[in-house]
Amino acid sequence: MLSHLRPHGSGIVLGSALSLAGSLLALAQPLVVKRMVDALGDGRPALGALAVLSALVVVGAATAALGQYVLERTAESVACTARRRLSERLLRLRLAELTRTEPGELISRVTSDTTVLRQVATRSIASAGSGLLVVLAALVLMALLDPVLLSIMLATIALTGATVAAAMPPIARAARQTQEAVGRMGSRLERTLGALRTVKAAGAEGRETAGLHRAAEDARRAGTRAAGWQALSATTSTVAVQLSFLVVLGVGGARVATGTITVSTLIAFLLYVFALTPRIGQLVESVSLLQTGSAAAARIDEVHAMGTEPVGLPAGAPVLPQEPHPPARVTFQGVCFSYGPGAPPVHEDLTFEVPPRTTTALVGPSGAGKTTVFSLLERFYRPDRGRILLDGEDIADRPLTRLRALIGYVEQDAPILSGTLRDNLLLNAPEADEAQVHDILRRTRLDSLVARLPDGLDTPVGHRGSTLSGGERQRVAIARALLRRPRLLLLDEATSQLDAANEAALHETLADIGRTTTVMVIAHRLSTVTRADQILLLESGRVRAAGTHERLLATDALYRRLAAGQHLV
């Protein structure tokens, strides 16, 4: 947790120093009250002492308020820094890491856990440090006033400390469980909202709501346990302080009656008791919050421990030229891959070559590893063995930023981001000008869609493109990829939701693009790839056969069965 606070140490120290100064000015007030009472008792004027007391009250309050403002501002910086680091880290995580963690759980660490860090920066670390110093200073002053009465206060502090120490481990466990339960609820909610149409169509709102209620109930139970232990420690400390006040009042009154101490001394001592009461409670709360903050910091650090992709280009790397490169040549050499230790192999000795300026189709039964080929080319995953070459160079040796800049990738579900249509089109190529955008819109037959939209390209498309049809989302995804002018274009079932007219027009566009770009297409509908220059038939993670549509019909039984099932024979 301290590693998150250390970069903001100057603000925390300044705010704590100002708060401490205000508290110390408050500690001087009982001594001035004692002097004023003594003066009044002796018949001397007390206006000077009253003026000093008033100045101490005003300056002390202003200094404490300024310190609180500095701490709150610093705490916002702590939370902002943690959120920025976390969000950047999340976007750099390897896909293998993301598949092991629910998105909602990760989101809760950016929102909920960083908010806890913000509270810790002001109410735990700073308050505990300044509060401890104030308590020590008050004890010294009380010792100077009356050591006997001080011993009563020390017994109170010892009792409070023992209670707090016993309550800390259960508080820490309950705080961790609370935050984990909130994360599970976020995951469940994200899952439901991401498929809300499916949930509504299935009439499953009640079951999903029940699941959310169970997650909320888990969080409530864990939070209640933490609150119970916190209440126990806080109540014990409050009762102990109140009991000590009564004892101090009784013992002090007896000492005043015997003439051992003066009335002014007892009044000053009681004022210090009043000043210590909130401070001791503050210390107890700070230590309790420290346990919660430690749990939050541990959850945040779990994200920082996850594997990430390399960022940026290596030092001294040349700048990419502005003009596009020639089409790419792709080569797979003995590639073996599985999604984890013990998982079944997806590819076994996968070997093939894709010449430049050609269209190559990947076909085969489900589970043959077609989409994984694209994931490996994008380096979302690394092969267990073998090499993947781009123009004869192993893609593992290329800077990741440069590798992906050469590839246009259209995923199977054609994801669309919330925002405007323009935001989505320029995601791959933010530098594209209006002429390039409108040319791509025309070639993908999106110009008619833009003409119908109320704000044209600046029309919001809704959450995940909810205002667009499936075919429109696919065309937007294709336009987004083409706008980058890639050397290698990867299309994963990119026309599955298009009508016949739009599909035919898009195939003409892709055929035109194929003269200047290498194109790889995954297709379950063989009718969409019959004119491909090369068709690779994958089965069980290997290339079973390769050739044109006519050649495969003549030479491979599996391809004939696939074609016959789609009435192409």
Image (cartoon, grey):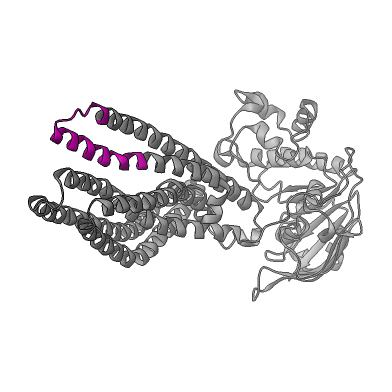
Q: Position of residue 405 (x, y in %)?
A: 79, 46
Residue 22 in the image: above or below residue 347? above
Residue 406: tell me if it is visible.
Answer: yes
In percent of width and height, residue 3 lies at 56, 55
- Measured as percent of width and height from the top left, residue 507 is found at 79, 43
Q: Is 116 on the left-hand or right-hand side of 221?
A: right
Q: Residue furthest bottom?
A: 342
Q: Quadrant of residue 468?
A: top right
Magenta-drawn stretch, dominant element (helix, strand or loop) = helix
Query: Could you say which is closer to the camera, residue 322 or residue 24?
Result: 24
- Where residue 205 appears, as percent x and y from the top left, is 39, 50
Magenta extent: 23-49
In the visual, does 8 lie left or right of 92? left
Question: Which residue: 29% across, 61% down?
Answer: 229
Relative placement, left or right, of 359 versus 35 is: right
Confirm whether residue 564 shows in the render: no
- Is residue 537 placed above or below 293 in the rendered structure? below
Is residue 528 or residue 245 the one in the foreground? Answer: 245
312 versus 226 height, above or below: above
Q: Quadrant of the C terminus?
A: bottom right
Instruction: Report if residue 426 lies within the magenta region.
Output: no
Q: Residue at x 63, y 27 (%)?
A: 458
* Closest to the observer, 511 or 438: 438
